[in-house]
Image: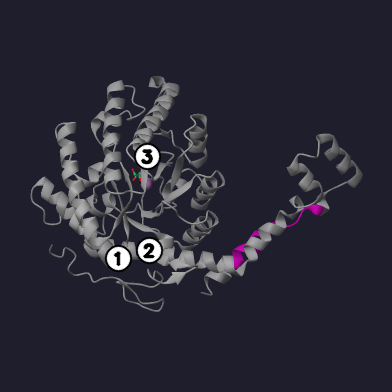
Amino acid sequence: MSEIFASIPKIKYEGKNSRNPFAFRFYNPDEIIDGKPMREHLKFAMSYWHTLCAEGTDMFGRATSDKSFGGKDPLDIYKKKADAGFELMDKLSIDYFCFHDRDIAPEGATLSETNAYLDEMADYIASLMKKTGKKLLWGTANCFNHPRYMHGAGTSPYADVFAYAAAQIKKAIEVTVKLGGSGYVYWGGREGYETLLNTDMGLELDNMARLLRMTSEYGRKIGFKGDFYIEPKPKEPTKHQYDFDAATVIGFLTKYKLDEFKLNIEANHATLAGHTFAHELAVARINGRFGSIDANRGDMLLGWDTDQFPTDVYDTTLAMIEVLRAGGFTNGGLNFDAKTRRGSFTPEDIFHAYISGMDAFALGFRVALALREDGTIDKFIADRYSSWKSGIGVDIISGKATIEDLEAYVLSKGEVLDSVGSGRQEYLENVLNSVLFNL
Ligand code: XLS
Ligand code: NI
Ligand code: NI
């Protein structure tokens, strides 16, 4: 196999003072931190679609980069994409990858032709995995690109389209299982609507649950042991995406008793929903649904999913605090659902992008651990809620105190303003800065 990114060396850790653009300054894959190598804490993954497929097209312009990697006919191109992906993962010390079914193989004229391409490419990828030790973090089905899905897949008004989506997802789960994937993602795609003038929302949501139940049960039947994830997103492509945010998805999963589903939280989707990335991770965590992360960022001034590589260390730090609080990743990891800007069209740009994103998360992780070690923030939170550890607080939590007891308590006590302390937000923000800039 000839080298595809010949001008790019294997990226090594050189420490924070290095100015080598093709080196890590904070990500040291084999450094043991908190009991295990950094690579096992962070579990970085390459997104197949952005890295090996997206060519920079937008509404106003055609491709600016070529992702055929020297391939000639369609299948050859997909094999070259795979070669390029495994070379990139090796050079960047990325252990995992994620894909949609249509990222790894071309679509044929019929489902059986498409499935045959998929089988051939799955075998090809399996051989590269065997050679390199790289692993599949999660697979998914692209049920949003083809025109048949213009009104949705599981929520299409047309039963034939539902059936097609179910068949497509069946195959995508089979490929995920075959490649030993530790996760399977459902991103809502076009599951949503534009206007109630043409939509039966109740039926669409019931059908979405039917599709999730049917396909996930099939996954278990064929031996899938990993996690199923829903990836919330509030808008784009449809105006009202059904999987708006973590809380909405959890409400949906609870209503339909889809208990084993976890969440794949994407940073840019969080901000589009009017939340912070850390908020969405916390909502997943406190509901026992924390699963995996699509690492990226949006642009404060733009209202769509720009899928930029994450470089904001405050953001990565606050996210990694949540990952630590959740006890770290089990089947999930940090998938870079991110792409270079259209004007950054060279292979070098892809490497710069991954290096910056991986370093931003590695630094965020180091800061999150240092904050935990420092203890100021955790202690502040514990103290702030200490009134629940004794007296009336314990009686409320245990259920012992009735509403009459609470009234008697307040009547005897008088005003309670004296019990209320400062939130000290500015002080805590400064604690964060002191730790961040002291590393
Ligand atoms: C799109 C989503 C998509 C999912 C996988 O906005 O982020 O890329 O991660 O289908
Ligand atoms: Ni995503
Ligand atoms: Ni996205």
Dot 2 lies on which element? helix
> Residue flagged by tag 2: what amino acid is it?
Met
- Residue 62 visible within the image: no
Mark 2 sits on what residue?
358
Residue at position x 30%, y 55% from top? 135
Report the predominant secondary structure element of the magenta stretch.
helix
Q: Quadrant of residue 418?
A: bottom right
Of the image marks 2 and 1, the number of the one nearer the N terminus:
1
Give the x, y percent position of residue 334.
Answer: 40, 55
Residue denoted by label 1: 92
- Residue 427 in the magenta stretch? The answer is yes
Mark 1: which amino acid? Leu
Would you say 141 lies left or right of 360 here? left
Tell me: 270 left or right of 164.
right
Q: Quadrant of the N terminus?
A: bottom left
Mark 2 touches mark 1? (CB < 8 Å): yes
**Which residues are drawn in magenta?**
419-432
Instruction: Give the residue at mark 3.
Output: 186
The picture places residue 398, in percent across and down from the top left corner, at 75, 42
